[in-house]
Amino acid sequence: MGSGESKVVYMDNNATTRVAPEVVEAMMPYLTDYYGNPSSMHSFGGQVGEAVKKARLQVAQLLGCDTDEVTFTSCGTESDSTAILSALRAYPEKRHIITTRVEHPAIKNLCDNISHITGHKYRVTRLKVSNDGMIDMDEYAQALSDDTAIVSVMWANNETGVILPVSDMARMAKSRNILFHTDAVQAVGKIPINLAEEDIDYLSLAGHKLHAPKGVGVLYVRKGTAFVPFLSGGHQEDGRRGGTENVASIVALGRACELANEMMEDENTRVRALRDKLEQGLLTTIPKSMLNGNKHSRLPNTANISFEFVEGEAILLHMNRYNICASSGSACTSGSLEPSHVLRAMGVPFTAAHGSIRFSLSIYNTEEEVDFVLEKMPIIINELRKMSPFWEDD
């Protein structure tokens, strides 16, 4: 990259994304000039209310749903908790939850602690995944029961990018009159979604995963679906979520959703091609490396690659010397020294799971950046393997 070596090469977009310049431009007036409360009766607040209404339409257009099915929240985690707890409170006689072994901590930890939160004992079925991260649909069919209150399955995995068969799973749940939730935080904006054609009851998204700011999210609730608010308070969000709206961020999310619609083709062509070049280059030039996750049913921007006999944390530290940003897994669990629960569930060998790196690209990445990473990564892995007592150079 020559004189550009000081430039940050950001390939950690599944952790968070750059706020798009167009999004910053859209939200700034609502941090300065248009500061009224959207619930106020006067016209100064009314125009702010109109901006929230426009943002709701922009979100609905990306999701393929109606505007009154869109509820603004603070983040994906809040949306996840709201959906699951709503289902449990709406059907207190049902004490069974189905999820997977590869969910984001927002779901995984909620299900771990749900009995403490609700005061009721629940049975949680965590579906296994295959070596490529896919669900065993026979196991899922057998898990569905009359006692199941809700199924919660992520649309796309945050660590591997594997796209799970949520359409089929939601259809099977509906045939048993069971509510279905999907954490679509990683999927929204990267792959086409049309909720009007799905049997999904709840869907969660987070603004900062699609070039909006942190601190704003959405919970989609299908019309007619049972719903009990998580945050009670005023009449905001049609009574579904109390608290004065985070207007600037909501406006930003609306614009980000509009941009995502416009850039979907680029995400699935140019960005995918960059990902493929990076992935193939690393697997070809670095021995004892392996791709984690289904090669075909995967987000266009994500590559999770294990480099055997080295530690992921050490790899990231060396990458940081070149200002290359990636991740050793979920940003919400990267403080742990334990190997990823997702890779463990997939049966990735211990020697590889510890050395896994997630590269997640965006529309802002360039071929020059990919070439730079392909130049530096073999050097980094070679240096670290020389220090590893487990590495034998053939």
Image: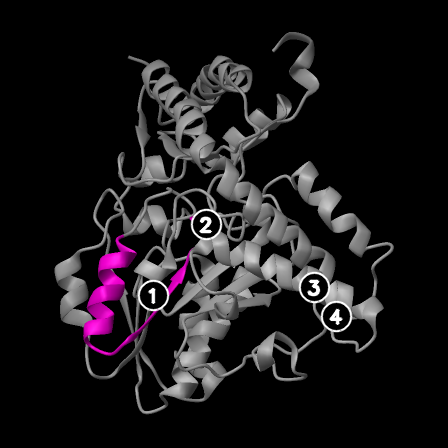
| 118 sits to left or right of 348 | right
Within 10 angstroms of label 4, few (less than 14), some, or many (20 or more) residues? many
Residue topped by disc 2:
188
Q: CA distance from mark 4 to mark 1?
A: 30 Å
| Among the two numbered marks 1 and 3 on one chain, the one whose residue lies closer to the N terminus | 3
Q: CA distance from mark 1 to mark 2?
A: 14 Å
Which label lies toward us, 3 or 2?
3
Residue topped by disc 4:
38
**Quadrant containing the N terminus in the rendered view:** top right
Residue topped by disc 3:
50
| 111 sits to left or right of 4 | left
Within 10 angstroms of label 1, few (less than 14), some, or many (20 or more) residues? many
| Among the two numbered marks 4 and 2 on one chain, the one whose residue lies closer to the N terminus | 4
Report whether residue 185 is seen: no
Kind of residue at badge 3: Glu
Answer above or below: position of 376 versus 228. above
Does residue 236 show up magenta in the picture? no
Callout 3 touching callout 4 (CB < 8 Å): no
What secondary structure is marked by label 1?
Answer: loop
What x and y, as percent, mark residue 122? 34, 82
Which label lies toward us, 4 or 1?
4
What secondary structure is marked by label 4?
Answer: loop
Residue 200 image label: 1
At a point 38% along the width and 62% down the height, the residue shown is 182
Q: CA distance from mark 3 to mark 4?
A: 8 Å
Kind of residue at badge 2: Val
At a point 62% along the width and 64% down the height, the residue shown is 74
Answer above or below: position of 230 versus 182. below
Tell me where residue 240 sits by quadrant.
bottom right
Kind of residue at badge 1: Ile
| 3 sits to left or right of 296 | right
Give the extent of the magenta segment: 165-187
